Amino acid sequence: SQKIEQNSEALNIQEGKTATLTCNYTNYSPAYLQWYRQDPGRGPVFLLLIRENEKEKRKERLKVTFDTTLKQSLFHITASQPADSATYLCALDPSGTYKYIFGTGTRLKVLA
Amino acid sequence: EPEVTQTPSHQVTQMGQEVILRCVPISNHLYFYWYRQILGQKVEFLVSFYNNEISEKSEIFDDQFSVERPDGSNFTLKIRSTKLEDSAMYFCASSAQGARTGELFFGEGSRLTVL
């Protein structure tokens, strides 16, 4: 069966450190993958999109990698801040038919 | 900055009642979506809509659900006869290009509580 897996356990890190979140998928061959941020009780907010032919994408303190061989994307936040505390979701459209599938999300807490 | 707006923010209804959740997508967007999130669980795809018809729907989106774009600005989700398990946050989203390359813009959600 098709799955998108993110570490369901919360990730706690110290302010200033780099947070690394993992998204693994099985039985998909997506052409691209997206990352979203979700705060409690609010809708997801888009952060980054990476295509299958891109190894890495950066935006300010954010970096995403995409390894289609490992079927894995890594999401990094450098110089993390308490304001980065949120749940981070990966998402992909397996067949390009506008059916966007989300992972379970990883809750990140940055400690001051 | 343009945004997706949803009403109501919270609705409480009795089991078996009909509910309509409303969304106003971003004005120049062409692709529209409904997702739901049961408390503590993941964001689940319900349906996508393009060119006035459903593009894709999930197993959750059964005959009790329907969507409509009645007037070119609103996008509605109707649940005909609500069940307890329909209690969730329902998110509307829109996209300029379609999910393949474009980001989804989500509204703040409508919380549905079925008693």
Image: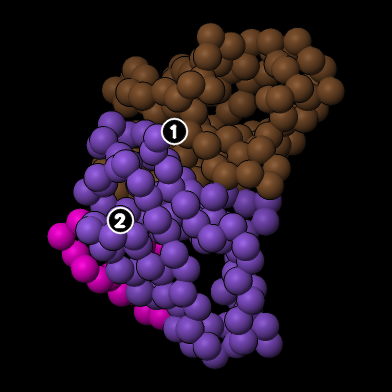
Chain colours: A purple, B brown
The residue beneath circle 1 is B33
Q: Which residue ends up furthest to the left in the rendered image?
A: A53
Residue shown at 50% from the left, 78% from the top: A19
Q: Examine the rendered structure and indicate whether residue B41 appears above or below residue B85.
A: below
* The magenta segment: A45-61
Judged left or right of residue B103, residue B91 is right
Residue B72 visible here: no
Q: Examine the rendered structure and indicate whether residue B38 appears above or below residue A7.
A: above
Residue shown at 47% from the left, 68% from the top: A21
Q: Examine the rendered structure and indicate whether residue A30 appears above or below residue A66.
A: above
Per the picture, the main secondary structure of the magenta-coloured stretch is strand
Quarter in which the C terminus of chain A is drawn: bottom right
Q: Amino acid at mark 2?
A: Lys
Across and down, in percent, residue A98 comes to 32, 34
Q: Are marks 2 and 1 on the same chain?
A: no
The local secondary structure at tag 2 comes to loop
Across and down, in percent, residue A78 comes to 45, 83
Residue B26, image quadrant: top left
Residue shown at 15% from the left, 60% from the top: A53
The residue beneath circle 2 is A71
Across and down, in percent, residue A41 comes to 68, 51
Q: Amino acid at mark 1?
A: Tyr
Judged left or right of residue A23, residue B43 is right
Q: Is residue A46 magenta?
A: yes
Q: Is residue A42 magenta?
A: no
